[in-house]
Amino acid sequence: MGTRLQNKVAIITGAARGIGRGIALRFAAEGAKVGVFDLDEMTCLEVVNEIVVNGGEALALGGDVTKPQDVEDAITSLKLRFGTVNIALNNAAIMPSGKLHETSLDDFEACLAVNLRGTFLITRAVVPGMIQAGAGCIIHMSSVTGIRGLPGLAAYSATKGALISLTRAMSTDYAPLGIRVNAIAPGTIDSPMLHSFVDMQTDKEKIRRQFDQMHPIGRVGTIAEVANVAVFLASDEASFVTGSVYEVDGGLSSKGEQPQD
Ligand SMILES: NC(=O)c1ccc[n+]([C@@H]2O[C@H](COP(=O)([O-])OP(=O)(O)OC[C@H]3O[C@@H](n4cnc5c(N)ncnc54)[C@H](O)[C@@H]3O)[C@@H](O)[C@H]2O)c1
């Protein structure tokens, strides 16, 4: 077990699977007490059990980030169990695909609700405790789609771009109060989300190769590579880092257009 997040209490949303789960396990391995927040309490419990078996501490928090009462209840339970929340990682998201005019109003609103309203509700619930403590750390999980245009992801990209603006605005508001606010913008990550997308395609090998080749580094990223950056940002090693967007994308957001032959 590491000690980089010892004595910290963290809430991670969307932590039952994928990147959120990976970060929850990693935070706990670095000594944080972790609130594992996701829609289904049973899947949260599986992550909690994995943490506890490995000697860490965690609490399963079943709830919907779009529902104010669920969020308030989760933060209250976490505070009662472990004390003031020091770290909030807004990771839960949904990703409707399609061009904007093809996106249904329901899908568009659901995307705004989970990706932005959820972030607002979690932030609103944790900030007062952080202000009282004079310290805290908030991390928004953005995406490379919030930085550059990628086809077929308009609604999702809008929310991921908004999270970057929110990071900058919040960092200026909260820096004087000791609260750091940063964002992580991953490229394509080898995750269940990617696997389900690839599984739906006819030529799985080809689509997988295209994802790898899209990134200048020549491959997609791993959940561990995102978790490494999250641990750094959440730790005191990042004490002078706020308002920053960390691109964990193998160079994708920096890539210019390839010259045509
Ligand atoms: N996987 C990638 O390649 C990739 C790339 C860039 C950014 N991201 C971002 O990383 C984050 C995690 O992505 P992932 O691939 O692990 O996604 P995922 O779909 O595997 O996991 C998302 C989790 O959020 C939960 N969730 C969804 N709606 C919720 C709600 N209303 N309340 C509570 N929990 C809810 C889901 O149950 C799920 O466990 C997201 O913010 C995503 O936009 C992912």
Image (spheres, grey):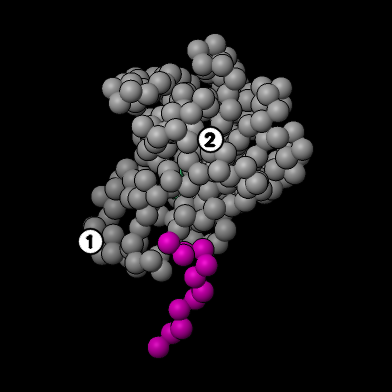
Residue 44 vertical position relative to residue 223 in the rendered view, above or below: above
**In-front residue for pair 237/127:** 237
Chain-order first, disc 1 or disc 2? 2
Q: Is residue 116 left or right of residue 253?
A: right
| Label placed on residue 5 | none
- Report x, y in % for residue 48: 36, 22
Residue 205's disc number: 1
Q: Residues within 10 Å of mark 2 (few under 14, many from 20)?
A: many
Q: Quadrant of the N terminus?
A: top left
Q: Which residue sits at x=44%, y=33%? A: 3
Dot 1 alpha-carbon crowd within 10 angstroms: few under 14, some 14 to 19, many 20 or more: few
Give how far across and how far down residue 212 sits, in percent.
Answer: 33, 63
Front one among 94 and 97: 94
Rendered-image quarter of ligand 1: top left
Residues marked 1 and 2 touching at CB (< 8 Å): no
Q: Is the CB of the residue bearing disc 2 within 8 angstroms of ligand 1?
A: no
Residue range in magenta is: 250-261
Q: Amino acid at mark 1?
A: Glu
The residue that mark 2 highlights is 89
Determine whether 81 is above or below 222 in the image.
Answer: above
Q: Amino acid at mark 2?
A: Leu
